[in-house]
Image (spheres, rainbow, N blue to C red):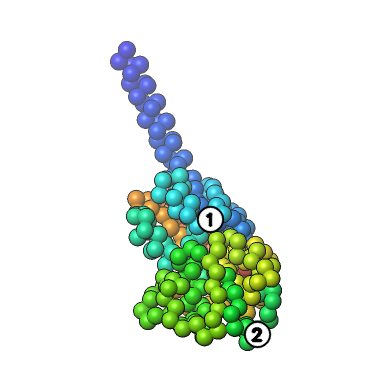
Amino acid sequence: MKGLFTALLASSVLLLSACSKDDDNKVKVAINTGPDEAIWQVVQQVAKDKYKLDVEVLNFNDYVLPNEALNNKEVDANAFQSLPYLESQSKERGYKFAVVGKTFVFPIAAYSHKIKNISELQNGATITISNEATTLGRSLLLLQAQGLIKLKDGVGYLPTSLDIVENPKNLKLVEVDTPQLTRTLDDPNVSLSIINTNFSAQAGLSAHRDGLFMESASSPYVNALVSREDNKDSDKIQKLKAALQSPEVAAKAEEVYKGDAIKGW
């Protein structure tokens, strides 16, 4: 009986050891649906070839669920959000996340099917912007940089429409869900829309080619690879970072985004 117990115990230890080793070679990552999917195919290949790491990618079509999945330990990391957005969400929802490494700056830009130049923007024109706090603030800062509005001093990265102190053209700023912004370009009442690169790219738009104006390369809105505090130093997360910040991935991002993705590391 004692011998049987010892054998069973030894088998259990070996099984747990095998599972633990297997888990160390697998990692789940949440990203946004769109052009990033092609980039992450390269991350998966580099991780497999160089680090013997299996990367499973889960695609989401919004900005809330990837963080919820990470917080609930449904994934090991995510890669979709800018640093200001991460900071905002962590404060609002109490996330205990860690920045593992920077990825790319995806410049936000203004697009239009109605006008070709900002000088054509009429008084009272309608501009659609994101209703998500960080992207909204980013859009307002871009409009301010173009001299279209003026914001209160000291608003930081998260201004709202209530912070507008000057609007010389009496522009109508309409807030909509971020994934719907590209659709508003076909609205006859909309003159301009401020759209994130990952969503504009899905509609075949390029910030450099099609944008009337866009953020500069010095934008603080660099995206990041994010994990939880409890797994940030794990071997598989560090291998994932190395695969993501590889020359192969940088080259793929250049190919996919055609200059609209600026390497952040």
What residue is at 40 percent from the left and 49 percent from the top?
71
Left or right of 186? Residue 199 is left
What residue is at 54 percent from the left and 81 percent from the top?
170
94, 232: nearer the viewer? 94
Picture quadrant where residue 17 is located: top left
Picture quadrant where residue 9 is located: top left
Q: Where residue 56 sits: x, y (%)? A: 54, 47
Q: Amino acid at mark 1?
A: Asp
Q: Secondary structure at mark 2?
A: helix
Pointer 2 local density, CA inside 10 Å: few below 14, some 14–19, many at least 20: few
Tell me, yes or no, whether the two marked residues, 2 and 1, touch with CB atoms within 8 Å. Answer: no
Picture quadrant where residue 96 is located: bottom left
Q: Where residue 44 sits: x, y (%)? A: 56, 53
Q: Is residue 127 above or below residue 177?
A: below
Q: Amino acid at mark 2?
A: Glu
Between tags 2 and 1, which lies in front?
2
In the picture of the structure, the residue carrying the numbered disc 1 is 62
Q: Where residue 8 sits: x, y (%)? A: 37, 21
Is residue 19 in view?
Answer: yes
What residue is at 33 percent from the left and 18 percent from the top?
5
146, 202: nearer the viewer? 146
Is residue 259 in view?
Answer: no
Sequence order check: which comes first, mark 2 or mark 1? 1
Q: Residue furthest top?
A: 1
Measure how far apart labels 2 and 1 are at the Cα level: 33 Å
Pointer 1 local density, CA inside 10 Å: few below 14, some 14–19, many at least 20: some
What residue is at 55 percent from the left and 69 percent from the top?
174
In the picture of the structure, the residue carrying the numbered disc 2 is 120
88, 234: nearer the viewer? 88
